[in-house]
Amino acid sequence: MDFEKREYFRGILLEEMRALLEEAEKTVSEMNADTTNFPDPTDRATQESDRTFELRIRDRERKLLNKIREALERIENDSFGTCEMCGEEISEARLKVRPVTTLCIDCKIEQEKAEKH
Ligand SMILES: [Zn+2]
């Protein structure tokens, strides 16, 4: 992959990371600011399920952040865009949709088939 394309994907990944971190920070500061007591049990239940939802989102964010970091590392060591199963190049169209992917579309389909069995 040439320099320009690497920079292009690095830009996408960094932007995605920035957006995620911003979102995560917002969630954390909302949780910290939220010290109100709810005397009404209905309000309380709503508040608690919101919190569960937030925690789940944060778990998803954390996993995605790890994937973005790994993708940035692959850009650094020049393995970005190479399928880790077959060693072929991953198509640019696929990388644009999902820059954190480590598998070409064929291997991804194979993997999903294998997971179903
Ligand atoms: Zn492959």
Image (tube, helix red, strand yellow):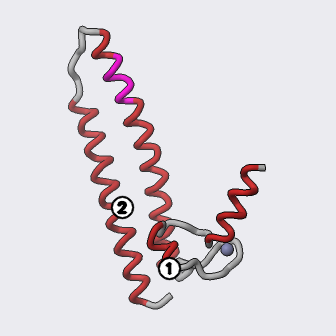
Q: How far apart are marks 1 and 2 (CA)?
A: 20 Å
Label 1 with label 2: CB-CB less than 8 Å: no
- Left or right, residue 66 beside residue 33: right
Report ligand 1 position as a quadrant.
bottom right
Which quadrant of the structure image shows residue 9? bottom left
What is the x, y in percent for residue 99?
47, 69
Residue bearing the label numbered 1: 92
Residue type indicated by callout 2: Met
Name the residue rendered at 36%, 23% in the picture. 48
Residue type indicated by callout 1: Glu
Depth check: 113 or 38 in front?
113
Depth check: 14 or 91 in front?
91
Q: What element carries label 1?
A: helix
- Give the tally of numbered discs: 2
What is the x, y in percent for residue 16?
36, 63
Residue bearing the label numbered 2: 17
Region rendered in magenta: 45-51
Majority secondary structure of magenta residues: helix
Depth check: 48 or 106 in front?
106
Q: In this view, does 44 lie above or below 80?
A: above
- Left or right, residue 32 beside residue 87: left
Name the residue rendered at 28%, 47% in the picture. 25
Q: What element carries label 2?
A: helix
Depth check: 87 or 74 in front?
87
Q: How crowded is mark 1: few (under 14 residues within 10 Å), some or many (20 or more)?
A: some
Name the residue rendered at 36%, 29% in the picture. 51
